[in-house]
């Protein structure tokens, strides 16, 4: 039996476990299939007893008490195995993930409007060719981070983007950023997921112009605007964020995210898609000294690292991860020419740049910056997130 048979033919209730971005995807996929969950599940006690997209969020004990025979759809990405073991231990055997639900969709009979909200996830799972005519040489980028400011309202110890290491933090050169994005988009056919981040993203006064520009690219499927919950949007920004493909992600670091509730309320009142993202731990990336690892060890670290897919654009240069981009920019890591691509190097034509980008994005070996890092893996030492240093970074403007 498969997901569809278990849920529809046996009339079992469906529970989505994971009240976050993949949970939202699973909900939309269920609705396309003509199904609805009875609730969401989540291990985060801060989410429990609240609602997510109109459905109650419950802990596993409550779910087991109310729906012992439910079909469980785990929408939790890399935490799938951990949650699977939890629900299996409670006697559940009809356990699936969001991809299993998506596999049941008859794309030929579903209007595009009903699936465009999770097009980025369909692309990740390899379903894009079932929806669009894709050229055989098309270049797809699963994720791209664009850094719009080095300034931040916090000074976090162990910041993976190294914001406290900037001696004179500043906003990006907007003209340079937009030219870089234009050049990338001339070479890349699709970007599944783009993140706009800092520093603290909302500090950049040119954010409306940047967002309006990004909104013009129909081949960017999902845009997340990242904020730490310490600021409210400037006048005029909210209107730019009211777009189907945009979601404002409010990182919740507890008390230091002092304006998160006001921010979430403002976003909801303005009709801007948003989600609250609580962080339980950060990975200890270690110091910047070289570890002198061998190629085999570096390759294994790169392939296991959660940051290896976080391609980042900073000052016109594309790096494979934030440790590489900010480490190089702050001088904490040597500048390794093989670790980045200068997208504004006009001596490289668009055709050659596209092929260099293809090789760069598909790289599965390692980058030299890996030898200056512990990596962000399942085995990483976990640290308290957003632990503030004695003196906060001065924020000008």
Image (tube, helix red, strand yellow):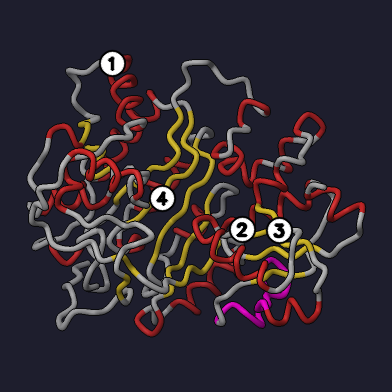
How far across and how far down the image is residue 174, in percent? 27, 45
> On the image, numbered disc 3 is attached to which residue?
95
**Residue depicted at 41% across the width and 73% down the height:** 229
- Verify whether residue 59 appears in magenta: yes
Looking at the rendered image, the quarter that the C terminus falls into is: bottom left
Q: Residue at x 22, y 37 (%)?
A: 317
Mark pair 2, 1: CA separation: 39 Å
**What number is the disc on residue 75?**
2
Q: Residues within 10 Å of mark 1 (few under 14, many from 20)?
A: few
Mark nearer the viewer, 3 or 4 = 3
The relative height of residue 60 versus residue 283 in the rendered view (above or below) is: below
Q: What stretch is highlighted in magenta?
A: 46-60
- Looking at marks 1 and 3 on the same chain, the residue that comes earlier in the sequence is marked by 3
The residue singled out by tag 4 in the image is 195
Q: At which x and y percent is residue 198?
A: 30, 58
> What's the CA distance linking mark 1 and mark 3?
46 Å
Check contact, mark 3 vs mark 2: CB within 8 A. Answer: no
- Distance, label 3 to label 2, CA atoms, is 11 Å
- Residue ID for mark 1: 352
Mark 2, other Cα within 10 Å: few <14 / some 14–19 / many ≥20: many
* Residue 69 sits inside the magenta stretch: no
Q: Mark 3 or mark 4: which comes first in sequence?
A: 3
* Of 337 and 3, the residue lying toward us: 3
Estimate the spatial distance between the alpha carbons at disc 3 and disc 4, rounded to whole Å. 31 Å
> Closer to the camera, 174 or 66?
66
Helix, strand or loop at disc 2? loop
- The answer to which of 300 and 344 lies nearer the viewer is 300
Q: Which structural element holds mark 3?
A: strand
Mark found first going from the N terminus, 4 or 2: 2
């Amino acid at each position: 039996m498969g997901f569809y048979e278990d849920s529809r033919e046996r009339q079992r209730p469906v529970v989505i476990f994971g009240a976050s971005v993949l949970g939202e995807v699973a909900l939309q996929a269920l609705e396309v299939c003509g199904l609805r969950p009875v609730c969401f599940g989540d291990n985060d006690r801060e989410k429990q007893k609240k609602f997510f997209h109109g459905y109650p969020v419950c802990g596993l004990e409550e779910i087991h008490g109310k729906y012992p025979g439910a079909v469980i759809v785990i929408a939790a990405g890399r935490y799938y195995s951990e949650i699977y073991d939890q629900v299996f231990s409670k006697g559940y055997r009809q356990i699936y993930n969001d991809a299993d639900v998506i596999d049941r969709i008859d794309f030929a009979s579903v209007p595009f409007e009903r699936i465009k909200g999770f097009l980025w996830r369909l692309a990740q799972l390899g379903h894009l060719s079932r929806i669009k005519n894709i050229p055989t040489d098309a270049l797809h980028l699963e994720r791209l981070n664009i850094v719009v400011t080095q300034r931040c309202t916090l000074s976090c110890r162990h910041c993976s983007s190294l914001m406290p290491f900037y001696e004179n933090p500043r906003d990006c050169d907007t003209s340079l950023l937009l030219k870089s994005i234009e050049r990338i988009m001339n070479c890349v056919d699709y970007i599944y997921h783009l993140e706009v981040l800092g520093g603290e993203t909302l500090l950049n006064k040119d954010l409306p112009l940047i967002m309006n520009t990004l909104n013009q690219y129909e081949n960017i499927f999902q845009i997340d605007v990242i904020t730490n919950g310490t600021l409210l949007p400037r006048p005029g920004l909210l209107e730019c964020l009211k777009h189907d493909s945009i979601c404002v992600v409010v990182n919740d670091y507890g008390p230091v995210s002092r304006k998160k509730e006001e921010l979430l309320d403002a976003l909801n009142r303005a009709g801007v898609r948003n989600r609250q993202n609580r962080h339980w731990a950060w990975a200890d990336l270690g110091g910047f000294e070289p570890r002198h690892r061998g190629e085999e060890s570096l390759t294994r670290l790169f392939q296991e690292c959660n940051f290896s897919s976080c391609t980042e654009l900073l000052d016109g240069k594309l790096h494979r991860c934030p440790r590489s981009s900010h480490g190089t920019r702050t001088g904490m890591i040597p500048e390794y020419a093989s670790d980045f691509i200068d997208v504004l190097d006009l001596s490289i034509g668009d055709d050659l740049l596209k092929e260099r980008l293809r090789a760069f994005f598909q790289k599965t070996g390692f980058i030299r910056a890996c030898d200056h890092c512990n990596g962000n893996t399942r085995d990483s030492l976990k640290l308290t997130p957003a632990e503030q240093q004695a003196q906060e970074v001065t924020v000008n403007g």
